[in-house]
Image (cartoon, rainbow, N blue to C red):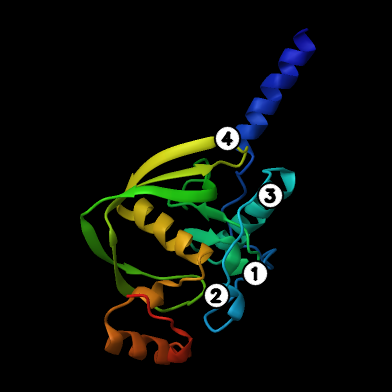
Amino acid sequence: MAGSFAELARQADQARDTMLVPKTALETPPLEIHTLGDEVLRQSARRIGKVNEQVRELARDMLRSMYTAKGIGLAAPQVGIHQQLLVIDLDLENAATPPLVLINPEISSASAGLDTYEEGCLSIPGVYLDVVRPTAIEVSFRDEMGRPRKMKADGLMARCIQHEMDHLNGVLFVDRVTDEAGLQKELKEKGFEHQHVRSVA
């Protein structure tokens, strides 16, 4: 019996640490992050039917690529994979803090209060502009072990989840920018073309 208990304990430990990958830059990240103008960013993502080791390995590769690019969030469509999977880590300095993995996320409620805050995106490097979003949200999702979860988020975490969930619907943060002159200027300076923006603001 003891052997099986030890095995169960080991599996529980593994499950808890399954997403801990080194938060360091790699010389060659496992996945390429697509940038504004690439059509793959505009396609909707499909729900994930079964959460298995393949999905977890994709999440780990996304994290490795995100850490290499020094980002705090990444959605699967940004690496050309049209599945409803997000990874988020707001604590890049602390190696022991596990990242958040959201599979098939859905926002069940959003606050009436709105916040304006500067956003950037690994798919539009160097461009930072103000975006208005709900201050707080409640989101339901499955974690990396396939367990159903619900969480309330506000501040930067709420913004980050909303930003990454937009990617699942082919929406980029520049589509939500209302400062048209600022948007044109920033895009031009960083070598992006305004024609690739699809305004939803």
C-beta proximity under 8 Å, tags 1 and 3: no
Can you tell which of label 2 and label 3 is closer to the viewer? 2
Q: Position of residue 156 (x, y in %)?
A: 34, 55
- Tell me how far mark 2 sits from mark 3, CA to CA: 22 Å
86 vs 144: above or below: below
Quote the CA–CA distance across marks 1 and 2.
10 Å
Q: Residue at x 77, y 15 (%)?
A: 4
Q: Which residue is mark 2?
A: 42
Residue 64 rendering spot, x and y as whole percentages: 62, 57
Name the N-terminal-most of marks 2 and 3.
Answer: 2
Disc 2 is placed on an element classified as helix
Q: Relative to residue 110, is residue 181 depicted above or below?
A: below
User: Mark 1 and 4 residues: CB-CB less than 8 Å, in contact?
Assistant: no
Distance from disc 2 to disc 4, alpha carbons, whole Å, reads: 29 Å
| Image quadrant occupied by the C terminus | bottom left
Return the residue nearer the eye: 71 or 159.
159
Indicate left or right for 91 with 135 as reference.
Answer: right
User: What x and y, as percent, mark residue 126?
Assistant: 43, 78
* Of 6 and 94, the residue lying toward us: 6
Residue 166 figure quarter: bottom left
Circle 4: residue type:
Arg
Q: Secondary structure at mark 1?
A: loop
Secondary structure of residue under mark 4: loop
> 10 Å neighbourhood of mark 3: few (<14), some, or many (≥20)?
some
Name the residue carrying label 1: 80
Q: For mark 4, what is the residue?
A: 147
Amino acid carrying mark 3 in the image:
Val
Between the C-alphas of marks 1 and 3, the distance is 14 Å
The disc label shown at residue 55, or none: 3
Q: Residue at x 59, y 80 (%)?
A: 39
**Quick one: label 2 or label 4, which is nearer the N terminus?**
2
Instruction: Mark 1 or mark 2: name the one nearer the start of the chain.
Output: 2
